[in-house]
Image: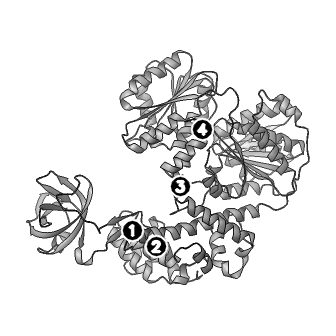
């Protein structure tokens, strides 16, 4: 892959672009010609199999091959709106094509000429109409057309023309980053061939083969990146610890550890006694007891004279961990401080002083723990919770606060091994696959909106028995076609839950307000918390025994499982009601899975099969370099192949050799954390 080529020029110099259009492309993240050729189609229009007008499915997109019969005179129906109508035939049936406000398209159509049309057909069995279709002259049409992500001001036709210009400037050496023997052993196309075919395929198989090569390149690079990060973190630590008496900690616990917790603690302590820093993931289901494992590791570190820091993604979760760790460790004489962005300057200054002097042994907080001004005395253990919510750079910044400290990361999102190896490839993994004794099964029911009133009645019963309830909505914005959490709470106060104490919680509330609302709910001052997914990782409320989730089809299965885990934390029998008005088979299938199992790992497998990996982490896979084309659900065979080849490249040290320089540069470009493969 050449270090300098025509592909690295600004897109402004590409034929058909110019300054004005370049600004539109920039909105899509496209600044150079290289950026453009990697701006991939999101789908294709297959024009190779047109149907007859009679066979076309009404109200659905169809491809039809027609001849123009006649053109009606333009009609202005109101100021600024002109309608053009054209009669076409496929030889057996006629159809009217309606064009809005485009004299150019109307004038382009010639009577007696053959065209391919793509668009939604409306009407009935005797009269058909197609409005604003995509129109191609049959003699010049591509058989399969790419459809790209666009922004206002750019059209598909513009994008296709510019893409052809960009590909004409591409030389194989400009884009190929894999040695030829790897290309051959993986049985994939060259990068240049793949890019040409992904944009302008002639057959569906072209798309398959092009996609396979690009996905393989992504997966191989990602796996090598994870392995390089692993090596980067394997520098000697100044905190090789020694065995310590853990009995005081175990005796002080108000419960008996599960076998999985004991095993994870042993694995962590063994790692922390080595000269190479621990780099371990605690992967556990909702309520599996990860915090107790973290507390044991912190106690072990404290006994070895080291400070520990736990970083959580939200202030609510940081406060939760602070309260839990205080309960575990302060009775044993270990001093803990909370550090979060919303604290007053004086509070922060006091916290900084205790941390710098070493008097504070455990620091719990949000991103505030990695801010400038926070200096640690003897930072020996770094813990991050909800690993996927932090980028690699943030995790590395935290580790840099000490001299190669031990690292423990926790995630309550159960992940199939296939996905875990890609996302957490730099970590050793301990799995908490047992729930603590006494955790009650949460009954889960999926119902349609027709049963909402009955569901509300059930929630009232549970509250009247002394419990509390969560009602979860998927949106905050006004005007969306989904429940608005604030407005919905007002409706409930006037209707189904008149007379009950209702609180509202969503991500846009100031941190202090969130804490105030959660504290009221935890203390029993509220009967119902109407909220968004901000409670997915929130404060434990043992008295909350019922959850109702509106528009459940809009959430991922793993996310619903996380939400469900907010109830069932006390003695009360608990229930989760999922409400959806979606009639799709996918929705029914997904919600059946959730209703039939309480295993997060089983649910995550189903999630991966049904919806793909994006479901685990919302719209962005936080902490994971972006994967544009690989499908971590469908590409399992390709993942295994990429892992085998990546492991071989790493084990043999080949990545440092001259022939692998383009691949090495691509891997290093994944991270801005100073990781270098040498």
Q: CA distance from mark 2 to mark 3?
A: 27 Å
Residue 136 is at least partly visible in this image: yes
Q: CA distance from mark 4 to mark 2?
A: 43 Å
Residue 676 is at least partly visible in this image: no
- The colour scheme is one colour
282 sits to left or right of 402? left
Task: Give the residue number, with chain letter if any, for mark 1.
Answer: 204
Task: Give the residue number, with chain letter if any, for mark 4.
Answer: 599
In this view, the mark in front (4 or 2): 4
Q: Earlier in the sequence, mark 4 or mark 2?
A: 2
Task: Give the residue number, with chain letter if any, for mark 2.
Answer: 36
| Label 1 Cα neighbours within 10 Å, binned few <14 / some 14-19 / many ≥20 | few
| Label 3 Cα neighbours within 10 Å, binned few <14 / some 14-19 / many ≥20 | many
Q: Residue furthest top?
A: 465
Instruction: State the quadrant of the C terminus.
Output: bottom right
Q: CA distance from mark 4 to mark 1?
A: 38 Å
């Amino acid at each position: 892959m050449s270090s300098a080529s025509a592909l690295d020029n600004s897109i402004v110099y590409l034929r058909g672009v110019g300054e004005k259009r370049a600004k539109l492309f920039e909105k899509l993240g496209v600044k150079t010609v290289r950026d453009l050729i990697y701006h991939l189609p999101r789908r294709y229009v297959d024009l190779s199999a047109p149907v007859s007008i009679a066979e076309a499915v009404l109200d659905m997109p169809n491809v039809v091959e027609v001849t123009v019969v006649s053109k009606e005179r333009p009609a202005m129906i109101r100021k600024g709106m002109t309608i053009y109508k054209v009669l076409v035939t496929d030889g057996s049936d006629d159809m009217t094509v309606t064009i809005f406000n485009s004299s150019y398209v109307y004038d382009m159509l010639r009577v007696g000429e053959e065209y391919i049309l793509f668009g939604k057909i409306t009407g009935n069995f005797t009269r058909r109409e197609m409005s604003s279709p995509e129109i191609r002259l049959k003699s010049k049409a591509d058989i399969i057309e790419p459809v790209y992500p666009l922004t206002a001001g750019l059209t598909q036709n513009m994008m296709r023309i510019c893409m052809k210009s960009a590909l004409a400037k591409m030389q194989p050496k400009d884009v190929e980053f894999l040695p030829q023997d790897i290309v051959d052993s993986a049985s994939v196309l060259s990068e240049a061939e793949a890019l040409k075919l992904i944009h302008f395929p002639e057959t569906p198989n072209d798309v398959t083969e092009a996609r396979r090569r690009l996905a393989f390149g992504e997966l191989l690079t990602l796996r090598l990146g994870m392995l390089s990060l692993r090596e980067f973190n394997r520098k000697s630590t100044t905190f090789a610890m020694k065995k310590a008496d853990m009995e005081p900690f175990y005796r002080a616990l108000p419960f008996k550890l599960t076998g999985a917790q004991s095993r994870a603690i042993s694995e962590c302590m063994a790692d922390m006694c080595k000269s190479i820093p621990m780099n371990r993931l605690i992967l556990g289901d909702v309520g599996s007891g990860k915090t107790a494992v973290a507390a044991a590791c912190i106690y072990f570190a404290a006994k070895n004279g080291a400070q520990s820091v736990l970083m959580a993604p939200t202030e609510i979760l940081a406060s939760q961990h602070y309260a839990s760790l205080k309960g575990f460790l302060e009775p044993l004489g270990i001093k803990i401080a909370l550090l979060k962005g919303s604290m007053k300057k004086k509070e922060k200054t006091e916290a900084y002083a205790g941390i710098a002097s070493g008097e504070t042994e455990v620091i719990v907080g949000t991103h505030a723990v990695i801010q400038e001004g926070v200096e640690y005395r003897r930072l020996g253990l770094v813990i991050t919770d909800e690993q996927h919510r932090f980028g690699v750079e943030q995790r590395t910044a935290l580790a840099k606060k000490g001299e190669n400290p031990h690292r423990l990361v926790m995630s309550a999102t159960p992940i199939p091994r296939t996905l875990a190896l890609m996302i957490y490839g730099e970590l050793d993994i301990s799995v908490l696959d047992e729930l603590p004794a006494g955790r009650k099964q949460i009954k889960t029911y999926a119902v349609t909106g027709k049963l909402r009133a009955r569901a509300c009645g059930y929630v009232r019963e549970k509250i009247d028995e002394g419990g509390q309830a969560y009602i979860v909505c998927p949106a905050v914005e006004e005007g969306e076609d989904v429940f608005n959490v604030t407005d919905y709470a007002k409706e409930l106060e006037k209707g189904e839950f008149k007379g009950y104490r209702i609180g509202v919680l969503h991500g846009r509330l100031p941190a202090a307000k969130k804490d105030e609302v959660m504290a009221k709910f935890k203390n029993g001052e509220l009967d119902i918390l109407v909220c968004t997914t901000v409670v997915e990782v929130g404060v434990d409320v043992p008295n909350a025994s019922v959850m109702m989730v509106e528009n459940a089809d809009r959430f991922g299965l793993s996310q619903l499982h996380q939400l469900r885990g907010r109830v069932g934390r006390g003695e009360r029998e608990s229930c989760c009601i999922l409400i959806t008005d979606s009639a799709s088979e996918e929705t029914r299938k997904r919600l059946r899975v959730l209703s039939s199992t309480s295993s997060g790992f089983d649910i995550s497998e189903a999630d991966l099969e049904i919806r793909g990996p994006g479901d685990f982490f919302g719209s962005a896979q936080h902490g994971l370099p972006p994967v544009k084309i690989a499908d971590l659900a469908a590409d399992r065979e390709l993942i295994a192949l990429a892992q085998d080849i990546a492991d071989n490249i790493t084990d043999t040290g080949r990545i440092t050799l001259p022939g692998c320089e383009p691949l090495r540069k691509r891997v290093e470009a994944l991270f801005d954390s100073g990781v270098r493969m040498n």
